[in-house]
Image (spheres, helix red, strand yellow):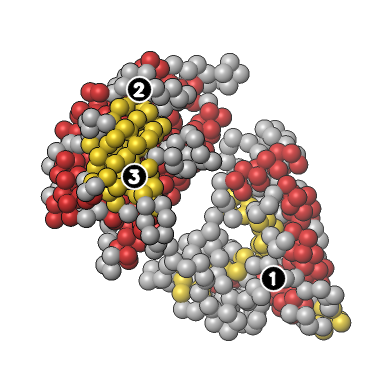
Amino acid sequence: MLTSAAEAVRVARSLVPLVAREASTRDRDRCLPHDVLRALSRSGLLGVTVPRDLGGAAVGAATVAEVLRLLGTADLSLAQILQPHFAFLNALRLRGGPEARRRVYSDVLAGALVSNAQAERSGRNAHTHATRIERDGEAYRIDGTKYYATGSLFADWLAVVAPAATPDGPRPHLAFVPADHPGVRIEDDWAGMGQRTTASGTVHLSGVTVSPELVLEQYRTFEGPTTYGALAQLLHAAIDVGAARGALEEASEFVRTKSRPWFESGVETATEDLLLVQSFGELEIQVRSAEALISTAADRVEAADALLAGEPPARRTPPPRPPSRSPPPRSSAAEPPWRSPPPCSRRRAPAPRRTRPTCTATGATPAPTPSTTRCAGRSSTSGSTPSTVAGLPGTDRSSAPRARTDTLMPLTFHWFLPTQGDSRGVVGGGHGADVVSSPAWRTREPSLEYLGQIAQAAERLGFEGVLTPTGSWCEDAWLTTAMLVGGTRRLRFLVAFRPGLLSPTLAAQMASTYQRLSGGRLLLNVVTGGESAEQRQHGDFLDKDARYRRTGEFLRVVDALWRGETVDHRGEHVTVEGAALQRTPSPRPPVYFGGSSPPLWRWPPRTWTPT
């Protein structure tokens, strides 16, 4: 008998090789898994949800979902047989009286299987019932026929759903019927396409008598909040996610052991084909995401159960989850990237609210890029600073602030838009380097079609935005991203630009127009300057210190314009008179600023609020 959630998961994992053995052959030839069901019955897994006061482990939704997910990686049909078993044991927990619980649970602890007898063919839908549960003296009598009764050919108990009389008319009841009752006949006639071995026979019920304690008022389950339906759907989803994991593992094994590389790929083995690796990587991300969602959903079901029972939610920290099957034999020393081990734990801490900390003076909101963020006494080397406006430049700082680790800040992830052209190598050199502009370096031109494919892929994979570079070595960031907006729906474009190369009034107007026409999808990356030689190509001969001072003036003017002010500014590097915008941006685009030059650390790290 199993006594804990960890033991249940361990036993389920140990059964996966047995379940997987000849699973495809069973489904192809429709050979019912008698031996596997006997092993499951002996393992104690069928009784893991039985309450502790009746001798069970009383495991929660997360454990049951993980058990079915694991079994689903090996045999989708077998896992499906167990779904109604656990769903109707949950119904017994919610509505069963002491005698019903004692009788059914004791059998389940001994290895009995509960199967469903719900669906019918004759009505408007599968849950329109012609079958009736009617009073017959001191007992109840059931007559009717149920179809697609999952697992019924292996059942010890049948959970029969049908209407019974109440003062308000017929309402759904649930009767637990011994499968060996003389009035029960189960027909082996399941001929579905796929999942052919779920033992989903037709159940004929003729004069079946049931004692009153085994007939539950199922309709009352839905008169208040309940997790009955949520658990049932969670288990269905867990089986599907397990099937996805199993299919991906089978596919990767086939590629490693049988596939040959495409003749134009230039590689020795299929596992070295980068396009194939990319496809597997994308599939792995989707499967892991689904596994994480199942885990989160299970946590929510357990929390709801605890709330309904008036108990505090349990804090679960499950052990790391290894791959669901033993790794298949390797065909070569090369290990494809998609076979990297899973994260140490799929359980996540509760996510923080998606708000950003307020900064001093102007209430700015830091956002991540690869530099140091300084905000209201906080510092993090995991993020970047949206640019300063008020008070730039100002207080001298001769050294970088010391990073603090006592505050966690939200992270957002961006991709990169290769508007200089793409290749399989890492770019050498910096801004303006010959290697970047050389056609020989590029293996793919930055066509609108190709850049659109990258933008759509980044959006599909969940990146918040794409950084678009600026310089004479790449396409113009403003024009390129404006042409890509129409091909995406959510993706934001982080447009890099240099304040010294256009007026602040024009930049403020361009950003305002971009925000309105894109639906607020502009992000700005202020680039104070690149290599001096490239700056001189654009007629900019200022040194770094002067460029930072110019950027400060530039951003002060932009900030005032975005606030709707009319600006007169005569500074060291920027002069405007009567500058104003007819329409201000809404919302204001977040402004990012990064750098590593010493002048940056002498620049006060105050930021503005994107209102």
Residue corresponding to mark 3: 133
- Graded by Cα atoms within 10 Å as few (under 14), some (14 to 19) or many (20 or more), the crowding at tag 2 reads few
The image shows residue 382 at horizontal and vertical percentages of 47, 61
Q: Residue at x 74, y 52 (%)?
A: 485
How far apart marks 1 and 2 lie (CA) works out to 66 Å
Q: Is residue 341 above or below residue 348?
A: above
Q: Residue at x 72, y 37 (%)?
A: 445
Q: Is residue 30 left or right of residue 52?
A: right
Q: Is residue 332 above or below residue 590?
A: above
Looking at the image, is mark 2 or mark 3 nearer the viewer?
Answer: 3
Q: Is residue 348 left or right of residue 595?
A: left
**In what element is the residue under mark 1?**
loop
Looking at the image, is mark 3 or mark 1 nearer the viewer?
Answer: 3
**In what element is the residue under mark 2?**
loop
Foreground pick, 534 / 241: 241
Residue corresponding to mark 2: 188
**Amino acid bearing label 3:** Ile
Q: Residue at x 29, y 56 (%)?
A: 94
Q: Would residue 559 be visible to someone looking at this image?
A: yes
Q: Is residue 333 left or right of residue 104?
A: right
How far apart marks 2 and 3 lie (CA) works out to 24 Å
Residue corresponding to mark 1: 588
